[in-house]
Amino acid sequence: PVAAVTSELSAALKQQGWKDGRGELKGPKNAILKRELGDAKLTIMIQPSASGSTIKIFADGLNWDGVESSPSPAPGSPSAEIDAVKKEAEKAIKDAFKDLPKGL
């Protein structure tokens, strides 16, 4: 459900140091989360879907330079959790685009 996803995402982002941003909206069927960390900003839209929830994340000001060449963080550290989320997101994006026709 949207409320459960909203709560879980909010808690996880807070644990990683993200602060609440302006313009956030939370309802029983839809939510828009706004988060900030330094110069980076996230807008997260959560909507119901047939099999659970659909989540769209818009990012601004994230710096991905050097991420691949960085040493692996200690297991269980906030950096390790961020890396795990990043890998999961990259896989989800790759999976989402694999069935699109070539040339789009």
Image (tube, rainbow, N blue to C red):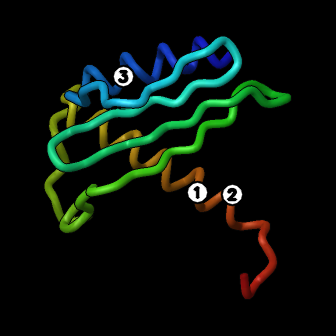
In the picture, the disc for residue 38 is none
Q: Quadrant of residue 30?
A: top right
> Label 1's element?
helix
- The residue identified by callout 3 is 12
Q: Is residue 11 above or below residue 65?
A: above
- The residue identified by callout 2 is 96
Neighbor class of circle 3 (other Cα within 10 Å; few <14, some 14-19, many 20+) is: some
From the viewer's perspective, tell me whether residue 71 is left or right of residue 30: left
Residue found at x 68% / y 35%:
54
Gap between marks 2 and 3 measured at Cα? 24 Å
From the viewer's perspective, tell me whether residue 52 is left or right of residue 13: right
Place of residue 8 in the rendered image (x, y in percent of width and height, measured from the top left): 47, 17
Q: How many marks?
A: 3
Of mark 1 and mark 3, the one earlier in the sequence is 3
Place of residue 4 in the rendered image (x, y in percent of width and height, measured from the top left): 58, 12
* Dots 2, 1 in contact, CB < 8 A: yes
Residue found at x 26% / y 20%:
15
Residue located farthest toward the front when viewing the structure as drawn: 23
Q: Is residue 87 above or below residue 2?
A: below
From the viewer's perspective, tell me whether residue 68 is left or right of residue 55: left
Neighbor class of circle 1 (other Cα within 10 Å; few <14, some 14-19, many 20+) is: few
- The residue identified by callout 1 is 93
